[in-house]
Image (spheres, rainbow, N blue to C red):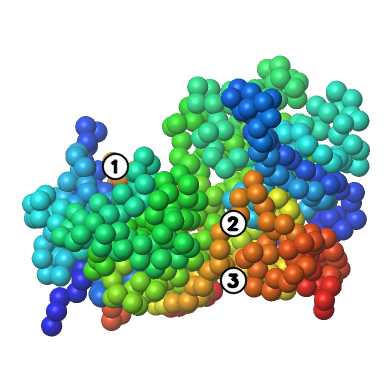
């Protein structure tokens, strides 16, 4: 049996700051299979982006991976040398950022950047690299790719730039793409186009995709599995339909309840009280305790991740057993 | 809840509009630099680039109503909001405030009009002075405008903060010491401190996390009931707009393409753009759906397409759409749409 494309086990990424240790990612585990989409959902500061950066080995000091394994096709990335990581990054594993200008160099033409990316990992002629770049642009739906290759990033609109960033990620047909809020800055109709490209990609090449977002609605339509993060920990995970229809963790229940379309028009939204805690001084036990309607004395103990139904994990000692009414 | 919401809705049917826009346009021109001016003098064909940010828009907002203004980036919704709030003069057209032309008001009345219309911005951090304490941010305007007696300011500010859901004990802090949601509450407290009856909210919840967004939306609804407020709620988020609004106005590239009561627009969208927009909204109910995407890009407002601005992306475009600008016409009571297809039917 071949190992899954990505298996993250008990990942801990901590930032050792002067003010103390920030446990941005604290005991996170999940698996993504070939051609599958995992939606990594959470609010700002939940550690979802740091999880993504950790997979690509892009955590800068004072942060570092403090424990756990990142198994990419069975190989542990956490212990890999920088040189070996370089061989994988951009080649077998790629990342798409929220702001495409993090990928693109503003003073280089698109063709220069794309050809460079191809040549960095493969010994092909310049002409062939150029051909590959043109095909990739066509694949993500950029009209007249031949001419667009000669353009600079500022000559593209926001949605087009994101497509170019995706095209660059696609150049080596990677096995895994980590996409960090790639459509958050885009308009609804453009977001629809990008999501369509992402779906096609998984279906055509069997690429595994981790889609990091704060928007449950996007994940609902795109992902196979979902992992909900809160204060550095995965609090709930499972197949998307089950998590959204029968959430176990009170935080997931609260998040789903906050979505306007889940509420009756004009009535007050079911809000989660309070705000996300600072990672510097997390309360002991369950981090969600202070905002949780079900909190009790036992929650002061750190709740373990437990399997409540087949394939359905949650980090809560008193999960919702019944389906939550829409 | 519905019985609480009903009175303002009833009033909305009868009342005179708080604000009415007639044929409002806003053009931005990039002025030529020295070389450009020189070249023009020498007979070269250089022109100033003109962006029609808002192009001949009519809009009414009645007392007690929540009007949702929806559109994608660059459609002119923020520019329109700014003109409604009176912080940006229109290039053409008239703005009527309680039935009177803004330009005909005396200086004192104009100040009244400006005070009673307040704006809440997307980025609460950028719209708060980082070097002022919260009590100064909230208290400055009511003091300057003489809305509170001398000596009463402190209690007044406390009251404003409490109403926006902030602890008055924090009033000596600076904006950077607050979280995003709290900053937005400061912005709301500041706007309400001058006792407005009309709020223009420009993407007021777009920068907030989902759980915080729900809190702020609930605050908006609570304040509406308590203070009998009228809102122009500008947003790109159709879910938020659907939840909050009585009436929805949809803009595309500087023009209003459709306008209808909220239920109507979401149940029976008429304009092809509205339909495409609604189809593309990710919904939490929809699982593993196929995304399709409206083809094409949003055109540049510098060089908008002729006729109907949507025609290059419209699946139903006809010859006529390229040549003739469709008028905003009533197709059902209270439901207006700007599409040539409605004439053919």
Nearest the viewer among A160 and B289 is A160
Above or below, comparing residue B181 to residue A190 in the picture: above
Q: CA distance from mark 1 to mark 2?
A: 45 Å
The residue positioned 67% from the left and 52% from the top of the image is B304
What residue occupies the far front of the structure in this picture? B43
Q: Which chain is mark 3 on?
A: B
Q: Which chain is mark 1 on?
A: A
3 or 2: tag closer to the N-terminus: 3
Position of residue A103 measured from the top left corner of the image (x, y, whole percent):
33, 49
Q: Which mark is residue A281?
A: 1
Look at the image and tell me whether residue A183 can be seen: yes
Secondary-structure class at tag 1: helix
Position of residue B14 measured from the top left corner of the image (x, y, whole percent):
90, 55
Above or below, comparing residue B113 to residue A75 in the picture: above
Q: Which residue is mark 2?
A: B298
Alpha-carbon neighbours of circle 2 within 10 Å: few (<14), some, or many (≥20)? many
Question: Quarter holding the N terminus of chain A?
Answer: bottom left
Q: Which chain is mark 2 on?
A: B
Q: How many marks?
A: 3
The residue positioned 51% from the left and 35% from the top of the image is B125
Secondary-structure class at tag 2: loop
Alpha-carbon neighbours of circle 1 within 10 Å: few (<14), some, or many (≥20)? few
Residue A220: quadrant of the picture: bottom left
Q: Which mark is residue B279?
A: 3
Residue A84: quadrant of the picture: bottom left
In the displayed structure image, the side of residue B111 where residue B138 appears, left or right: left
Alpha-carbon neighbours of circle 3 within 10 Å: few (<14), some, or many (≥20)? some
């Amino acid at each position: 049996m071949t190992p899954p494309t990505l298996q993250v086990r008990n990942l801990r990424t901590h930032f050792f700051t002067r003010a103390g240790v920030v446990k941005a990612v604290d005991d996170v585990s999940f698996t993504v299979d070939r051609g599958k989409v995992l939606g990594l959902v959470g609010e700002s500061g939940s550690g979802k982006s740091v999880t993504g950066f950790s997979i690509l080995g892009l955590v800068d000091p004072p942060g570092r991976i403090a424990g756990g394994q990142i198994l990419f096709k069975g190989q542990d990335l956490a212990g890999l040398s920088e040189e070996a990581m370089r061989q994988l990054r951009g080649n077998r594993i790629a990342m798409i950022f929220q702001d495409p200008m993090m990928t693109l160099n503003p003073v280089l033409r698109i063709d220069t950047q794309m050809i460079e990316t191809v040549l960095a990992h493969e010994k092909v002629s310049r002409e062939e690299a150029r051909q590959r770049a043109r095909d990739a642009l066509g694949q993500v739906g950029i009209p007249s790719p031949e001419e667009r290759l000669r353009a600079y990033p500022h000559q593209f609109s926001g949605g087009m730039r994101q497509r170019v960033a995706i095209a660059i990620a696609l150049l080596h047909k990677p096995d895994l793409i980590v996409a960090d809020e790639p459509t958050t800055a885009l308009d609804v109709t453009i977001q629809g186009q990008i999501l369509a490209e992402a779906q096609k990609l998984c279906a055509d090449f069997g690429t595994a995709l981790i889609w990091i977002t704060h928007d449950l609605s996007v994940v609902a339509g795109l992902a196979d599995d979902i992992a909900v993060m809160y204060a550095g920990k995965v609090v709930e995970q499972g197949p998307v339909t089950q998590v959204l229809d029968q959430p176990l963790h009170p935080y997931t229940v609260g998040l789903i309840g906050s979505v306007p379309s889940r509420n009756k028009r004009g009535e007050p939204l079911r809000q989660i009280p309070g705000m996300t805690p600072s990672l510097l001084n997390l309360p002991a036990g369950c981090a969600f305790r202070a905002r949780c309607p079900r909190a009790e004395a036992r929650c002061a103990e750190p709740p373990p991740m437990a399997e409540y139904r087949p394939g359905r994990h949650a980090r809560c000692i008193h999960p919702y057993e019944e389906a939550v009414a829409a | 809840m519905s019985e609480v919401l009903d009175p303002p809705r009833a009033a909305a049917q009868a009342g005179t509009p708080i604000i009415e826009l007639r044929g409002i346009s806003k053009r931005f021109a990039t002025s030529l630099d020295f070389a450009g001016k020189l070249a023009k003098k020498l007979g070269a064909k250089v022109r100033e680039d003109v962006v029609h940010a808002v192009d001949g828009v009519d809009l009414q907002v009645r007392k007690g109503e929540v009007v949702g203004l929806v559109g994608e980036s660059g459609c002119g919704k923020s520019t329109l909001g700014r003109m409604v709030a009176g912080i940006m003069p229109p290039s053409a057209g008239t703005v009527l405030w309680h039935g009177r032309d803004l330009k005909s008001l005396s200086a004192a009345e104009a100040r009244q009009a400006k005070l009673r219309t307040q704006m809440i911005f997307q980025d609460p951090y950028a719209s708060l002075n980082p070097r002022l304490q919260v009590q100064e941010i909230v208290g400055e305007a009511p003091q300057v405008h003489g809305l509170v007696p001398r000596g009463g300011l402190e209690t007044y500010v406390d009251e404003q903060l409490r109403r926006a859901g902030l602890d008055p004990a924090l009033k000596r802090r600076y904006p950077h010491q607050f979280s995003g949601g709290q900053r937005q509450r400061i912005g709301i407290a500041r706007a309400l401190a001058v006792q407005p009856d009309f709020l223009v909210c420009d993407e007021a919840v777009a920068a907030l996390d989902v759980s915080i967004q729900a809190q702020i939306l609930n605050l908006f609804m609570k304040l509406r009931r308590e203070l009998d407020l009228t809102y122009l709620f500008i947003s790109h988020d159709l879910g938020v707009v659907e939840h909050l609004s009585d009436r929805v106005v949809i803009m595309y590239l500087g023009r209003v393409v459709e306008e209808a009561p909220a239920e109507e627009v979401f149940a029976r969208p008429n304009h092809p753009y509205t339909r495409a927009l609604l189809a593309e909204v990710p919904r939490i109910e929809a699982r593993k759906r196929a995304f399709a995407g409206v083809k094409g890009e949003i055109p540049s407002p510098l060089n908008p397409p002729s006729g109907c601005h949507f025609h290059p992306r419209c699946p139903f475009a006809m010859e006529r759409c390229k040549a003739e600008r469709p008028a905003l016409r009533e197709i059902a009571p209270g439901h207006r749409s700007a599409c040539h297809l409605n004439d053919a039917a």
